Each structure stands twice: as C-alpha cells, then as structure tokens.
C-alpha cells in the first residue's frame, strides 16, 4: 500500500473548519479573492466575512458559477441556460 504523503496525507481540516453558513440548495462556489459567491438554488449569494447578501435571483437553479476578470460573475442554470451578473451597472445613454 502506498504511503499517503503531501497533498494525499489524511487530515481533519474539513471536520474542524469553522461553519460560516447554512444554505438551502448549494450547488457551486466561486471566489474573486475578496468574497465567496455561492450558487444556492435560484440565487447567487455573496459571503464577505460575516456579511451575507443576495447578488441576484434567477428563474432556474444555478448549477455552475465562476468569477470573471472584469468583476462580473458567470453561471449556468439547469437545462443549459447561461446567466451573467455584473457588479457595475451599465450606464444608460443620455436622452
């Protein structure tokens, strides 16, 4: 039997980790290096320290999530629908 060293070495990190929240239907996680984003059912949540906020809600459950270099978030909903959130609101053209 091979020895489990390095990355394969058994540990108790998950068992002893601090619980930061409980969610209804968590599917995926993503981070931009500052906050943790959670695909929780039809909602994308932002967890920043102890603060928890809903970023956006969709009509289908979100199954995949990633943070984009421009600060936005991309995801995929069930049955292949794509979704995208942007932190910056698009500017409306002047009247």
Image (cartoon, helix red, strand yellow):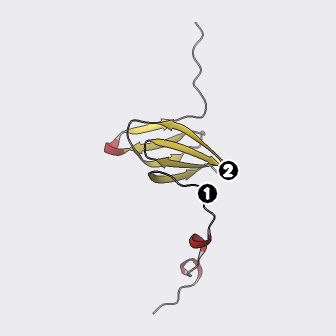
Picture quadrant of residue 81: top left
Picture quadrant of residue 69: top right
Q: How many tags in the picture?
A: 2
Query: Which residue shows up at 58% across the image and 55% down it?
Result: 21
Q: Between residues 37 and 43, which one lies in front from this camera angle?
A: 43
Instruction: Assign a secondary structure to mark 1.
Output: loop
Query: Which residue shows up at 44% across the image and 37% down it?
Result: 83
Q: Quadrant of the C terminus?
A: top right
Label 1–label 2 contact, CB within 8 A: no
- Residue 1 lies left or right of residue 51; in this view the side is left
Badge 2 density bin: few <14, some 14–19, many ≥20, Cα 10 Å? few
Per the image, the residue denoted by label 1 is 20
Query: Which residue shows up at 59% across the image and 80% down it?
Result: 6
Expressed as whole percent of the image width and height from the top left, the position of residue 78 reads 35, 45
Q: Between residues 24 and 54, which one lies in front from this camera angle?
A: 24
Expressed as whole percent of the image width and height from the top left, the position of residue 2 reads 48, 90
Q: Between residues 78 and 73, which one lies in front from this camera angle?
A: 78
- Residue 63 lies left or right of residue 72; in this view the side is left
The relative height of residue 68 versus residue 87 in the rendered view (above or below) is: below
Query: Which residue shows up at 33% across the image and 43% down it?
Result: 80
Q: Residue 50 — which label? A: 2
Q: CA distance from mark 1 to mark 2?
A: 8 Å
Q: Residue 5 — which label? A: none
The relative height of residue 88 versus residue 6 in the rendered view (above or below) is: above
Instruction: Assign a secondary structure to mark 2.
Output: loop
Residue projecting furthest to the top: 95
Query: Which label's residue is closer to the chain start, 1 or 2?
Result: 1
């Amino acid at each position: 039997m091979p020895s489990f060293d390095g990355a394969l070495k058994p540990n108790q990190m998950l068992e002893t980790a601090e619980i930061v929240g409980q969610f209804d239907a968590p599917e995926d996680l993503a981070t931009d290096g500052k906050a943790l984003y959670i695909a929780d059912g039809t909602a994308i949540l932002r967890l920043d320290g102890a603060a928890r906020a809903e970023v956006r809600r969709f009509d289908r459950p979100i199954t995949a999530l990633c943070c984009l270099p421009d600060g936005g978030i991309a995801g995929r909903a069930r049955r292949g629908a794509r979704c995208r959130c942007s932190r910056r609101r698009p500017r409306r053209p002047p009247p």
